[in-house]
Image (tube, helix red, strand yellow):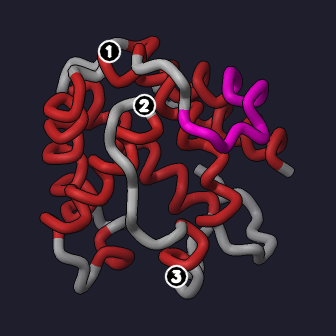
């Protein structure tokens, strides 16, 4: 299932010209079961530390609320709190000194009926924010590879056919 999702995402992102995401998702197939944060902080440094991560989240969160595909999922969610939680989570995933203390991804997304197309839309928006904030291509891919396994806890278990574009 995970490898088929990677193939599907890769094909869609390539068609959209988003080669960073396509390359990343192929690369993350080697990290299928990785759960522990990295032991070094090279990714954290490549993102510019916590300030750099926060800058991306300050760009990313408004894009989520402005995107017609994503906005319904964030209705009633405080954007400042969301940005702070995402900053802590990405800081931890990047090997920084932060510790994410929010609820589990499974619990947070349990009743949202998130489908593959929704997950892919969020990845697309995150890529836009990373590019806008000047995150190096390789650092984008490394972060997305760290985050990709979360799809198991975010996407609903219903069998959705890939959306035709």
The reply to whether discs 2 and 1 touch (Cβ–Cβ < 8 Å) is yes
Looking at the image, residue 64 lies above or below residue 74: above
Residue highlighted by disc 3: 112
What residue is rendered at 68% in x and 28% in y? 28
Looking at the rendered image, the disc whose residue lies closer to the viewer, 3 or 1, is: 1
Q: Which of disc 1 and disc 3 is earlier in sequence?
A: 1
Q: Nearer the viewer, residue 157 or 86?
A: 86
Numbered tag placed on residue 94 in the rendering: 2
Residue highlighted by disc 1: 46
Looking at the image, residue 25 lies above or below residue 148: above
What residue is rendered at 27% in x and 25% in y? 131
Does the magenta segment cover residue 28? yes
Q: Please give the range of residues in magenta.
A: 26-37
Residue at the right extreme? Answer: 1
Q: Nearer the viewer, residue 158 or 58?
A: 58
Residue 156 location, quadrant:
bottom right
């Amino acid at each position: 299932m995970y490898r088929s999702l990677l193939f599907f995402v890769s094909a869609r992102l390539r068609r959209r010209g988003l080669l960073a995401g396509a390359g990343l998702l192929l690369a993350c197939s080697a990290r299928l079961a990785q759960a522990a944060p990295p032991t070094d902080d090279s990714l954290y440094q490549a993102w510019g530390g916590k300030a750099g991560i926060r800058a991306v989240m300050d760009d990313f969160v408004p894009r989520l609320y402005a995107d017609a595909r994503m906005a319904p999922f964030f209705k009633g969610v405080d954007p400042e709190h969301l940005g702070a939680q995402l900053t802590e989570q990405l800081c931890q995933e990047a090997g920084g000194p932060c510790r994410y203390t929010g609820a589990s991804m499974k619990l947070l997304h349990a009743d949202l009926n998130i489908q593959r197309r929704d997950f892919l839309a969020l990845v697309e928006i995150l890529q836009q924010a990373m590019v806008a904030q000047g995150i190096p291509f390789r650092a984008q891919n490394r972060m997305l590879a760290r985050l990709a396994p979360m799809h198991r806890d975010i996407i609903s278990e219903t069998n959705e056919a890939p959306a035709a574009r």
